[in-house]
Image: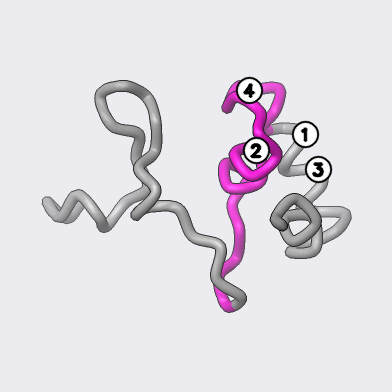
Amino acid sequence: MSEDPESVSAPDASGITPDRLLHTGGSDRPSAEDLVLASGRDVTPETLEWARRKLADEGRSALDRQLP
């Protein structure tokens, strides 16, 4: 595992993922965490499962609909 803190998308000590680690670019595959955060919800096991289902059903458009 790399020692570079930007090499992984991990929450900081406060439990919040820094903006520089989130990705929403057109070529990226959004994660369930990205979708939960874009929807304004807290990251919990339940919201992550919701996001996984949405991404499986709708693909990237699930995230695109959450962003302005």
At a point 80% along the width and 63% down the height, the residue shown is 61
> Are dots 2 and 4 in contact, CB under 8 Å?
no
Mark 2 — residue?
36
What amino acid does circle 1 point to? Trp
Q: Is residue 36 left or right of residue 57?
A: left
Q: Is residue 64 left or right of residue 5?
A: right
The boundaries of the magenta stretch are 27-48
Closest to the observer, 33 or 2: 33
Mark 1 lies on a secondary structure that is helix
Mark 1 — residue?
50
Determine crowd level at label 3: few under 14, some 14-19, many 20+ residues with C-alpha closer than 10 A.
some
Q: Earlier in the sequence, mark 2 or mark 4?
A: 2
At a point 15% along the width and 55% down the height, the residue shown is 4
> Are dots 1 and 2 in contact, CB under 8 Å?
yes
Q: Residue furthest front?
A: 68
Residue 53 got which mark? Answer: 3
